[in-house]
Image (cartoon, rainbow, N blue to C red):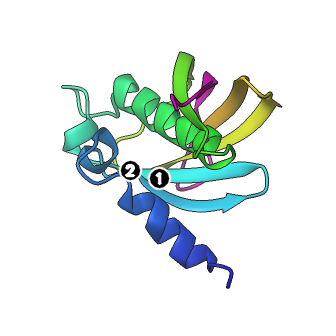
Amino acid sequence: MQKSKEDFLAQINAVSKNTLMETLDIEIVDFGDDYLIARMPVTNKVHQPDGILHGGATAALAESVGSFASHIFIDTDKFFVRGLEITANHLKSVKSGFVYAKATFLHKGRTTQLLDIKITDEADTLISICRLSTISLPKAN
């Protein structure tokens, strides 16, 4: 029996318990054949001292959704994923609401992956553009 989309989302979000993703309230909300979407509430927990979304929290959201995307598209019985490099260009500020991170693959190789991650607000305004490279390494036997 195939799992429903809702069951799969619940399963992958359960993995985030007691992690940075739970601390920042990051939740995976949608996925498809070539993308994964997460959201994070913009509250004082992720603000800079002047009351706007901290770029580090944005980068944590981007790395979380990108690494998760790499993770769910590989054979996790044989491989594990690690981030290699992340870049983030912040274009606009956000004070409240939710931000959404959509990770799509630019390259999905056997060993390395390159993801484009766009961060948008609730009005679908582009907030940040991020790139994440990951590596899939074999698990020890």
User: Decide: marks 1, 2 in contact (CB < 8 A)?
Assistant: yes
* Residue 110 percent location from the top left of the image: 78, 28
Find the distance from the CA under tag 1 to the CA under tag 2. Answer: 6 Å
Residue 123: in magenta span: yes
Residue hosting label 2: 26
Residue 98 in view of the camera? no
- Residue 121 versus residue 2 in the image, above or below: above
The residue located at (71%, 26%) in the rendering is: 113
Q: On the picture, is 19 further left or further right than 91?
A: left
* Residue 92 percent location from the top left of the image: 51, 30
Residue 49: in magenta span: no
Q: Tell me which secondary structure the magenta stretch mostly adopts.
A: strand
46 or 3: nearer the eye? 3
Crowdedness near tag 1: few (<14), some (14–19) or many (≥20) residues, C-alpha within 10 Å: many
The residue located at (68%, 80%) in the rendering is: 2
Say which amino acid is labelled 2. Answer: Ile
The residue located at (69%, 46%) in the rendering is: 73
Say which amino acid is labelled 1. Answer: Arg
Q: Earlier in the sequence, mark 1 or mark 2?
A: 2
Q: Secondary structure at mark 2?
A: loop
The residue located at (27%, 37%) in the rendering is: 46
Crowdedness near tag 2: few (<14), some (14–19) or many (≥20) residues, C-alpha within 10 Å: many
Q: Which mark is residue 89?
A: none
Quarter holding residue 105: top right
Residue 25 in view of the camera? yes
Question: For the magenta stretch, what is the residue range?
Answer: 120-141
Q: Secondary structure at mark 1?
A: strand
Residue hosting label 1: 39
- Residue 98 versus residue 109 in the image, above or below: below
